[in-house]
Image (cartoon, rainbow, N blue to C red):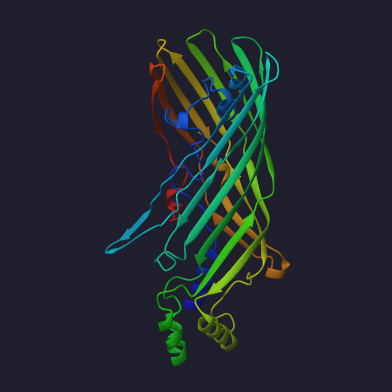
Amino acid sequence: MKLKKLSLLLLANLVGLSLMAEGYQINSQSARQVGMGHLGTALKLGSESMLFNPAGLSFMQGKYEVSLGATAIFSKVKYMNDSYSVETDNPIGTPLFGYAGFKITDKIFAGISITNPVGNTLVWPDNWVGAHHIQNISLKAFSIQPTLSYKINDKLSIGAGLMVDFGSFAIEKALTRMGALNALGGLNPAFKTVLDMYANQPSVTAKLEGESAISMGFNAGILYTPNDRLSIGVSYRSKVMMEVNDGMTTLSYAGPEMKSMITTVNTMMPGAVPIPPIDGKNFTASLPIPSNLNVGIAYKTSEKLLLSAEVQYVGWKAYDKLTIGYGSDAGNLQLVSNKNFKNTMIYRIGGELTICEKMTWRFGAIYDTTPVDKMLYSPE
């Protein structure tokens, strides 16, 4: 019975990739707009409008405009259970953004942008109590977007862009709980010696990594300015499926003695320590970048003060499960991890106060909700 439970544990805990907070989406693609709660659907942001609302690009000042930058994300996760506690040692996240806009005619504007729409990095200790859930995870995606915007008149403009997305991911986790193989020590004194030698290390670890193929999506928007004070905007970014078609799996053991012991045990009792036949095997997987529908309104109360509010509807329901699929050389194994994400709303308010020609204050607030099913919440 113990060995049967171990087999189920190995397969169930091999894949994960789910996050709390706002999922794995990144909303920090403009230094200016982060200061205003990262809103901009109803604003004329020049070249940066390519992300927030491509219709706003046609209100760009001048013949060309370039905006480049990056933001720093400092994250820390702590796990506590009675007297036991452990923290992640995450590197600083540095999502980047770049926008270049150009005036073609008085009514037609074009541009190209690069952003990081999603991403996440977590580094847990290799030997922490939840190593069978996750040790390390890295998710990166880039989106290149050529954009066109047309100014119908001084009050109304439209815009659209083609999103060309690509990226990579890697996930590493132990195949067994810490100490799960200790019962094997009773079979042979030599086995107990090996288990004691590696008592503080995972017996077997799996690492899955791969590059995604290029995927396509679109971004479109409309901006209406009925007067000099009021503007209303609507924008939509489509869902994009990131497809990994040739990922690689690598298994590693705590040491050569551990590998030899597991091999010996499985020779004596076939399947006693069920290691999936995935070492050195390719896999396929897909992960959605969710759709986003934004509706915003901005109002200039005076020459110095601009206020804006925005609602963002995120299509997280597209992430219902993660399936890692192997070919016939691995027995057509499929590892399915249920996610059951739900669509969410993000509420943003922000403002900009011009103090003088050389100083502007910006302020904003965000209320976000998690897409994660709390019954499936994990340290990933």
Quadrant assignment, res 245: bottom right
Q: Is residue 122 left or right of residue 318?
A: left
Q: Nearer the viewer, residue 80 or 164?
A: 164
Find residue 223 and report its horizontal and vertical position in percent. 58, 18
Find residue 260 and report its horizontal and vertical position in percent. 55, 85
Find residue 185 and report its horizontal and vertical position in percent. 43, 86
Residue at (44, 75) in percent of width and height? 180
Find residue 55 and report its horizontal and vertical position in percent. 61, 21
Q: Is residue 349 left or right of residue 117?
A: left
Residue at (66, 23) in percent of width and height? 102
Residue 168 shows up from this direction: yes
Q: Is residue 296 above or below residue 253?
A: above
Residue at (64, 63) in percent of width and height? 248
Q: Residue furthest bottom?
A: 189
Q: Is residue 182 left or right of residue 14?
A: left
Residue at (54, 43) in percent of width and height? 118
